[in-house]
Structure formats: structure tokens, C-alpha cells
């Protein structure tokens, strides 16, 4: 037998090899088919009759779900930088997505409703120490369009609102222009601008992305992305039918260009981990689970869709003649002096008016007939301090180094902690603090270790934390060393008796520290020694006094508002006023069970009652001074609108004084207007035809804006603009007009194309709602049945 095998072994090996190859080929392929039935499932039939399978659609979805700008949100690998933003630029910005969503609301509503529920409970960032440093204030300074979009979104945050989806789109586009990384930088900037505000360490680690959304999927849901993908595929089929063609080389060249641009933008990313743009490109394909052929095929479809709609938009012609005439008209300009309220006095809502009136009542004497007059003198420091000591401060310039005692616990090892706990001199102290240990044996160190080990984990953690604190307390040299190594800051600091928002953590009453700083020698004194101070036995400060004001002073309105002092004072006054008035109108202030409503429930009503006299005076003054057309438009003004006009009378009085060459410098520095020499044209804020009709050496009326920004203008002379400036503006206006018409043409074509797609059932998301049992063998799905299972 062995001789037989030895003689014919070559043939036997050949037969066995063939059998193995055949079995692997058959059973391996069969196994793959069995394991991936969904990939070959037909999910919809395109407008040209082509069956689109699951894997083809998902390749498009994966490619367009993120784009190269998303890396500003992720700050790491993940977004597809080969996609330059097809959904954002070509669907959302143009307005095509809104039309698409309106045709398939049932498919989108489930995704959107779950997002709305979460978004209603989302809280924007507020600095824990400085109430002025908030996300909304950062938006106001650096991204006003985003703040406006956010407010509109909150008003339309309901699926029943026809404008809700458009509001979501506008907010998405606005936050793309000012992403979380920009917001973080803005908040840090605002923090640095506020003297005496400690850095919030949370800013360095929390996710500031609006609603926690990062990608288009987060904002609109997976159904929307698949609707977009199916529409792009259908549009590409229509483009091919119309004769459009995109070669593989064209698509590959554009993908590589996108990769190169993103690589250059991302060179400073420490997580990049690649040596050149080629590795960058290959790594992105690997992360998406694609090869180059698939990526090129997907991008060919995107480019076909883009060319089809781009040609529709570019077919619109824009005549420059009307803009040339406008530019000639706009050459006129005004040269003169602008007088405006300082930003701190621009009252943009009813709450800011309440704070302003509360401040005036606290720092000045006001007669009944001077409701709208700003005081020409403030009360003395001692008078203000009697009722509102929190509005009095002493100014210093200090050199400060800070050390956190809790951080010193890191110097204590676990071994040192345990050894300290079981020492005879410490064990009794530990037992007194934690009575659980008194019930256990502890005569020897071994018994003490056993007693500690028997504690619950949470209690053992408390014991160890207490022991580390005690060890740090026994080593004051550690604190001195930490203060010596800490970074020194020189900054102006204001301290008051009621100190709740200081650079010094835990400081609630500044009297003691004020005395110490007043008695400390200046650093310029050779005998000066540092002052070591703590208000909470955790945060320690080494302080040198560089300079100090000779006397206490009253906080300005801006300072008191930023510190949150006025918010507390307003809340206190409203609480007192509510108790005073609620018996006069029980129906408005009582619940159904005749219990009093909380102040939070009726705060607006109470505030309107308390400040009714001021609101009435503002409206009467405005109606008297303003043109009849303007006063008619602002009849029955809301408290917010009236708040923006609180200083309208003051501005008019200031203008009258200037016209008479009277003294214009206010004895109270914080009321002084901001004076600036300017050149204005017809497009500048506050400029209207009436101002050009005034001529030289004339005064404009007081211009009003809803944010409380009041101003007026003295016209010295009427001048002209340079032609090159006008020509540049002309080109921009023509381009802007063409873009508007182009977008409108694309939206019109979108409507007609979607009609054709819906008639043919060429978009369907029914496959997303199937259970595994419904999906059968994967290849047995009837494309006609699949196509008819449309959304509507």
C-alpha cells in the first residue's frame, strides 16, 4: 500500500488540491451570500428604471454624511474630507433640501421629533462666575447671524410649524460658519477681557457644539441623508439622460484636489499621523471602508448632479444697468460726527431696563417729574453703602499667584496615605471622623488595615481623601513651593463688602481682605512681603499690592451688571413688590386651588406692574418726539421695545445741547456719548434719504434700533466716493443678484424634477423600516413593489 502511494503521490496531491480549491470556491462564496443578504437587496428603482441596491446607496450615504468642514467640530480623524460639502452647499444653502423635505415629511418627522425633544432641554454655556460670559453674548459679539437663527429656531421648534424645517436649516448653516472651536476661543477671549474673572477649566474639555450635534445626520437624521443620497443618484441619472458626462479621471482629480486642500489645512493637527497627502487620502478611504474605484463612482454621481443644477442656475442672466444707476446714486456720502450710546447703556430687553432702573434708584435721588432724566450726580459712597454695600468697591492693582490645595494631594502616594491612617497618633482622629471604624478591632496596624479594607468603597474613598488633606496640612512647605512656582498675574481688582464674584475663590465678604491690602506695603517698598490669603482654605493666593485707589467708589452700571449684582437686586425687589401687589388682583396671581403662583410664573406681570410708570413715560416721550408714521408703527409697544427706547429722551436732550453749543460733557462719566468722526454712504447704518436732504451743518434725528443702539449724526459736508470703490461694490451686487436668481431657478427645477421622481416612485425609504424577517433572502425583492412603497 505504501509503495502504491509513493508511486502515485504526484497524482494524489493534484486531485486533493483541485478538490480543496473547488470546495473553497463554492462554499466560500455561498457563505458570503448567506451572511450578506441585505447588501444585494434592491432598495429603490431610479427614475431611469435602474435598480439601486443597498450597498450602492449606502456607499453614497457614507460619502456625503460628513464633509471636510466637520473636522472643525471633531478636531480629529472621522469626517470625510474628500467631500467638499455637497449636502450643505448644494442642497441646504440653495434651498433644495427644504423642497425635498416637504415632499417626504412622514419619513423625516420621526427623526426630527426625537431631536426636538432633546433640543428643548439643551442649556447654552454660562460661565459659573461671570454671568456676562455666555454663549449668547459670544454670539452677539462674533456671530450675530447665529444668535438670530437660534432665536428663530426656538420660535419654530415644532413639527406642526411649516417654517420649522427651514429654521433648522438656517441654524445649521449659521453654526457651520461659527463652529464650536470658534465659540470656545470667543468665550476664552471674553473671559480674559473681564478683570478679576477666574478661568473656567470646563471650557477646555466640554463639547460646545450646539445641541451636541456634529454632523448633518445629528441635525436632520439618517432618513434625511438617505433621501438626499437617493435624490442625488436620481439627478445623476437624469443628467446622463440629458447628455452630461463626467469621466473617472475628472472625478478622481477633484477628489485628490479636495484631499490636498484638506491636508494643507490639517497639517498642524497633532493627531494627523500621516507623512503626506497621499497617505492622508488612503487613510480616509480605509476609514470609510472604500477603495478608490467606489469613491470615484460616488463622486461621478455627485458631479453629474452638480452640473445639471449648476447649468440650470447659470442659465439666468443678470443685467448690470440697474446697479450702475444705483451706484451712481450711492456715490454720495456724508462726512461728519457720530454720537452714540456706549455699548454698556444699550438696553436691548425688558430685563436690562429693570437692572438700569434698579441701579439708578440705588445710586441717585430721583424726583417724580424726572422719570427719564439721567442723574447729574450720584449719591456719596457712604449713602450708597448704607443700603447697597455690594455696589461699593475699592480698586487695587495686584500681582497674584494662585495654588490649589486640593492639587497638592497628588504629591501624596497611596502607600503614604495608608501608613498615615494606621499610625497611633492619627488612628483616633480618623475613628472620630468616621465612627464606622470605632466598631472594629484596631489595636495593631494589621487590624487597622483590615478594618479599613472592610469599609465600603465609597466610605474608604472618603477616609483616604480626608487623610490626604491632613497630610497636606502637615506640610505647609508644599503650599509655599506651589505658590513660588505658580504663574504670576498682574491685574486690576475691585473688592466690595458683599463680594460674590471675585477673582478670589470663595470670597463672600471682602472687608477683611480690604483691610489687609490697605495695610500692606506696596511692592515697590524694599521691605514689602507677600500677603498669603485664602477664603475657603483650598485656594491660596500670594499677593503683592502694586497700587491702590485712595478711596472707595461706586460701581458703574456696566460693572454691576457684568458681576451679576444687579440681577440679584432686581430679583429681590420683584419678590418684595409681588407680595405687595398680589392681593390687588388675586385672579391673575392665584392657581386654581387658590394658592399663590410662584414669582417665576408671573415674573413678567409683576415687573410690568412695578415699572409701569417708566414704561408709560418712555412711550409718551417717544410718541411726542417721533414722526407720526414711526409712532403709529410702534403703537402698543412691548416692554422689550420700550426698553430699547429708555434713553431716547436723553439722546434728544444731548442733541439739543450740542445744537446750542451747550456743555455736553456729563458730570457722570458713564453717561457720556461715544463721539466718532465718520464718512457714511447710503448703505451705512442709520442713513436715510432725509439725511442727504439736510445738507451741510445739519443734525439728523435720533436713530433707534431694537437692540437699544441709539445714535445721531452731525453732517459737516456732503462728499463722494471713489469710482473704484463703487465699481467693486457694483460687481458684488450683480453677483449677489445673480446668485439669488440662480438659487430660485434651481428650486423651481427641483420642484418639477421631484414631481417626476414621485410619479415614478424613484425615492423610497421603506427598506429602513423592515424587520430582518421581512428582508427574505435579499435578492428576492420585487423592484416594482419596492418602488411603489413610497413615503407618501
Image (cartoon, rainbow, N blue to C red):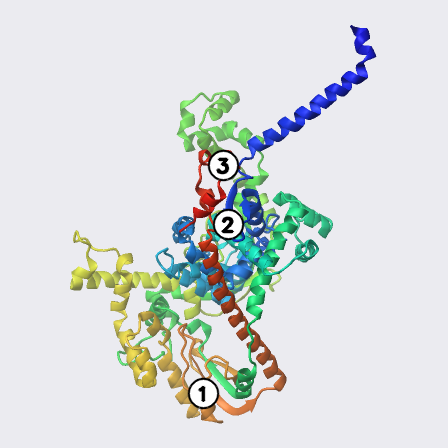
Callout 2: helix, strand or loop?
helix
Mark 3 lies on residue: 465
Which of marks 3 and 2 precedes in the sequence?
A: 2
Callout 1: helix, strand or loop?
helix
Q: CA distance from mark 1 to mark 2?
A: 51 Å
Which of marks 2 and 1 precedes in the sequence?
A: 2
The structure residue drawn at horizontal position 44% and vertical position 71%, both measured from the top left corner, is 344
Asked if disc 2 and disc 3 are in contact, CB closer than 8 Å, the reply is no
Asked if disc 3 and disc 1 are in contact, CB closer than 8 Å, the reply is no
Mark 1 lies on residue: 689
User: Image quadrant of residue 364?
Assistant: bottom left
Nearer the viewer's eye, disc 3 or disc 1?
A: 1
Callout 1 crowding tier (Cα within 10 Å): few <14, some 14–19, many ≥20: few
Front-most of 571 and 773?
Answer: 773
Front-most of 697 and 251?
Answer: 251
> How far from the left and from the top, in percent, is residue 571?
32, 61
Which of marks 1 and 3 precedes in the sequence?
A: 3
Quarter of the figure that contains the N terminus: top right
The structure residue drawn at horizontal position 66% and vertical position 26%, both measured from the top left corner, is 24
Front-most of 464 and 743?
Answer: 743
Q: CA distance from mark 2 to mark 3?
A: 53 Å
> How far from the left and from the top, in percent, is residue 592?
17, 53
Callout 3: helix, strand or loop?
helix
Task: Reply above or below: 119 against 577.
Answer: above
Residue 664 bears which disc, if any? none
Nearer the viewer's eye, disc 1 or disc 2?
A: 2
Work out which residue is located at the far top of the displayed protein and give it.
1
> In the image, 506: left or right of 626?
right
> How far from the left and from the top, in percent, is residue 653?
38, 85
> How far from the left and from the top, in percent, is residue 573?
29, 63
Mark 2 lies on residue: 226
Amino acid at each position: 500500500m505504501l509503495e502504491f502511494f509513493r508511486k502515485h503521490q504526484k497524482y494524489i496531491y493534484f486531485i486533493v488540491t483541485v478538490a480543496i480549491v473547488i470546495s473553497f470556491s463554492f462554499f466560500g462564496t455561498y457563505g458570503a451570500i448567506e451572511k450578506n443578504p441585505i447588501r444585494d437587496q434592491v432598495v429603490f428603482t431610479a427614475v431611469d428604471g435602474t435598480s439601486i441596491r443597498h450597498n450602492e446607496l449606502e456607499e453614497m450615504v457614507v460619502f456625503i454624511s460628513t464633509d471636510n468642514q466637520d473636522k472643525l467640530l471633531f478636531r480629529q480623524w472621522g469626517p470625510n474630507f474628500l467631500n467638499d460639502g455637497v449636502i450643505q452647499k448644494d442642497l441646504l444653502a440653495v434651498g433644495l433640501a427644504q423642497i425635498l423635505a416637504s415632499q417626504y415629511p412622514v419619513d423625516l418627522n420621526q427623526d426630527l421629533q426625537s431631536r426636538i425633544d432633546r433640543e428643548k432641554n439643551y442649556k447654552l454655556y454660562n460661565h459659573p462666575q461671570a454671568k456676562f460670559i455666555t454663549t449668547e453674548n459670544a454670539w452677539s459679539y462674533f456671530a450675530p447671524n447665529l444668535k438670530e437663527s437660534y432665536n428663530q429656531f426656538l420660535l419654530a421648534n415644532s413639527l406642526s410649524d411649516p417654517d420649522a424645517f427651514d429654521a433648522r436649516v438656517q441654524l445649521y448653516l449659521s453654526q457651520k460658519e461659527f463652529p464650536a472651536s470658534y465659540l470656545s476661543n470667543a468665550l476664552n477671549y471674553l473671559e480674559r477681557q473681564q478683570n478679576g474673572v477666574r478661568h473656567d477649566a470646563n471650557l477646555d474639555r466640554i463639547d460646545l457644539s450646539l445641541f451636541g450635534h456634529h454632523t448633518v445626520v445629528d441635525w436632520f437624521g439618517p432618513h434625511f441623508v438617505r433621501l438626499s443620497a437617493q435624490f442625488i443618484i436620481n439627478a445623476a441619472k437624469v443628467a446622463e439622460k440629458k447628455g452630461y458626462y463626467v469621466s473617472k479621471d475628472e472625478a478622481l482629480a477633484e477628489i485628490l484636489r479636495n484631499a490636498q486642500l484638506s491636508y494643507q489645512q490639517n497639517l498642524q493637527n497633532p493627531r494627523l499621523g500621516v507623512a503626506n497627502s497621499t497617505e492622508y487620502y488612503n487613510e480616509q478611504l480605509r476609514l470609510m471602508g472604500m477603495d478608490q474605484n467606489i469613491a470615484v463612482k460616488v463622486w461621478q454621481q455627485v458631479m453629474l448632479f452638480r452640473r445639471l443644477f449648476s447649468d440650470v442656475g447659470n442659465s439666468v442672466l443678470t443685467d448690470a444697468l440697474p446697479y450702475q444707476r444705483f451706484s451712481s446714486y450711492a456715490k454720495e456720502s456724508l462726512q461728519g460726527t457720530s454720537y452714540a450710546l456706549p455699548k454698556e447703556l444699550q438696553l436691548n430687553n425688558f430685563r436690562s431696563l429693570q437692572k438700569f432702573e434698579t441701579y439708578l434708584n440705588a445710586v441717585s435721588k430721583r424726583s417724580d417729574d424726572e422719570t427719564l432724566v439721567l442723574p447729574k450726580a450720584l449719591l456719596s459712597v457712604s449713602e450708597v453703602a448704607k443700603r447697597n454695600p455690594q455696589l461699593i468697591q475699592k480698586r487695587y492693582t495686584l500681582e497674584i499667584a494662585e495654588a490649589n490645595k486640593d492639587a497638592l494631594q497628588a504629591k501624596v502616594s497611596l502607600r503614604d496615605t495608608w501608613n498615615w491612617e494606621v499610625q497611633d497618633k492619627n488612628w483616633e482622629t480618623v475613628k472620630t471622623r468616621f465612627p464606622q471604624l470605632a466598631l472594629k478591632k484596631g489595636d495593631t496596624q494589621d487590624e487597622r488595615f483590615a478594618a479599613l479594607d472592610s469599609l465600603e468603597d465609597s466610605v474608604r474613598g472618603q477616609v483616604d481623601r480626608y487623610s490626604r488633606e491632613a497630610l497636606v496640612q502637615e506640610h505647609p512647605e508644599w503650599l509655599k513651593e506651589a505658590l513660588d512656582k505658580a504663574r504670576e498675574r498682574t491685574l486690576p481688582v475691585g473688592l466690595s463688602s458683599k463680594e460674590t464674584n471675585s477673582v478670589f475663590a470663595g470670597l463672600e465678604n471682602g472687608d477683611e481682605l480690604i483691610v489687609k491690602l490697605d495695610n500692606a506695603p506696596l511692592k515697590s517698598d524694599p521691605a514689602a512681603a507677600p500677603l498669603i490669603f485664602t477664603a475657603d482654605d483650598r485656594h491660596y493666593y500670594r499677593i503683592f499690592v502694586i497700587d491702590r485707589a485712595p478711596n472707595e467708589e461706586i460701581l458703574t452700571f456696566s460693572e454691576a451688571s457684568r458681576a451679576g449684582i444687579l440681577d440679584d437686586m432686581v430679583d429681590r425687589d420683584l419678590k418684595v413688590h409681588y407680595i405687595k401687589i398680589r392681593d390687588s388682583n388675586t385672579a391673575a396671581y392665584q392657581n386654581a386651588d387658590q394658592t399663590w403662583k410662584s414669582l417665576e410664573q408671573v415674573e413678567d406681570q409683576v415687573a410690568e406692574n412695578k415699572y409701569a410708570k417708566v414704561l408709560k413715560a418712555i412711550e409718551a416721550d417717544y410718541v411726542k418726539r417721533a414722526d407720526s408714521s414711526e409712532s403709529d408703527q410702534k403703537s402698543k409697544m412691548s416692554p422689550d421695545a420700550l426698553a430699547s427706547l429708555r434713553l431716547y429722551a436723553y439722546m434728544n436732550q444731548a442733541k439739543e445741547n450740542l445744537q446750542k453749543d451747550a456743555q455736553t460733557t456729563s458730570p457722570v462719566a458713564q453717561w457720556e456719548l461715544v463721539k466718532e468722526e465718520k464718512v457714511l454712504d447710503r448703505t451705512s447704518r442709520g442713513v436715510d434719504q432725509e439725511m442727504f436732504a439736510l445738507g451741510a451743518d445739519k443734525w439728523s434725528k435720533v436713530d433707534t434700533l431694537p437692540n437699544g443702539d441709539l445714535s445721531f449724526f452731525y453732517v459737516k459736508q456732503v462728499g463722494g466716493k471713489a469710482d473704484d470703490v463703487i465699481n467693486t461694490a457694483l460687481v458684488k451686487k450683480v453677483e449677489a443678484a445673480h446668485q439669488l436668481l440662480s438659487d430660485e431657478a434651481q428650486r423651481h427645477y427641483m420642484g418639477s424634477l421631484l414631481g417626476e421622481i414621485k410619479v415614478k416612485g424613484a425615492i423610497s425609504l421603506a427598506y429602513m423600516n423592515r424587520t430582518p424577517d421581512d428582508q427574505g433572502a435579499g435578492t428576492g425583492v420585487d423592484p416594482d413593489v419596492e418602488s411603489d412603497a413610497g413615503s407618501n
